[in-house]
Image (tube, helix red, strand yellow):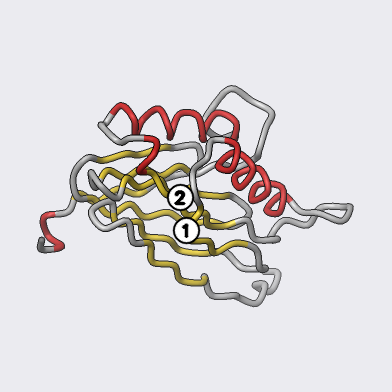
Amino acid sequence: MEESEFQRVFLSPGEIAGFAGPALVTTVLGSCVSITLWDKDRRIGGINHFVLPRGGDSARYGEVAVHELLDLVLSLGAHLRSLEAKVFGGAAVLPVGGEGSVGTANVAFALGELARRGIPVVGRRTGGHRGRFLVFNTESGDAFVRWLIEHEPLPAA
């Protein structure tokens, strides 16, 4: 299939997307996490982008985003037993006190929820101190990840 035949979508924080056809879904992650779910038998894929593990009733929170993503791909015809997951993001880009970071908490939540549901994680690019640019191909299940460039702070005007 030619790349021009793919639907193209940019996913913002708190959004979820799923496709039973070919799509390229792009997002940018710092401490946020994206989970991709892909049914390898039916070529159905979905992705979320959440900001925090818990604390609200929107898809900006992992507890909602994971549930809604799973519901979406199943409604498109995916089967739970055929799903595989990949997890991205969770960088320590936000200064917070204590031992952990928002990114670490997001990754731990994502991995725990996938394990609880019995969905194998077949790929993972998490942690670090820089953000990532992610493109998810719903036709193949492939994910392409690129580090964001670190910049020096701009001088005060």
Element type where label 1 sits in the image: strand
Residue 147 in the image: x percent, y percent?
51, 72
Residue 81 in the image: x percent, y percent?
39, 39
What residue lies at 23% left-to-right and 50% top-to-bottom? 23
Dividing the image into 4 quarters, which one contains the N terminus?
Answer: bottom left
The three-letter code of the residue at mark 2 reads Ala
Q: Is residue 90 above or below residue 145?
A: above
What residue lies at 59% left-to-right and 50% top-to-bottom? 32
For label 2, the crowd category at 10 Å Cα-Cα, with few meaning under 14, some 14 to 19 and many 20 or more, is many
Drawn side of residue 18 relative to residue 155, left or right: left
The three-letter code of the residue at mark 1 reads Val
Decide which of 111, 80 is in the foreground and name it. 80
Q: Is residue 29 above or below residue 74?
A: below
Q: Is residue 86 above or below residue 130?
A: above
Q: Are marks 1 and 2 in contact (CB under 8 Å)?
A: yes
What residue lies at 51% left-to-right and 64% top-to-bottom? 132
- The circle on residue 39 is none
The residue labelled by disc 2 is 85
What residue lies at 81% left-to-right and 54% top-to-bottom? 100
Decide which of 108, 49 is in the foreground and name it. 108
The residue labelled by disc 1 is 122
Give the mark, 1 or 2, whose residue is nearer the N terminus: 2
Decide which of 31, 136 is in the foreground and name it. 136
User: In which image quadrant can residue 115 be found?
Assistant: top right
Residue 90 in the image: x percent, y percent?
63, 56
Element type where label 2 sits in the image: strand
Which residue is farthest front?
81
Residue 114 in the image: x percent, y percent?
55, 42
For label 1, the crowd category at 10 Å Cα-Cα, with few meaning under 14, some 14 to 19 and many 20 or more, is few
Q: Is residue 127 above or below residue 18?
A: below
What's the CA distance linking mark 1 and mark 2? 6 Å
Drawn side of residue 113 relative to residue 132, left or right: right
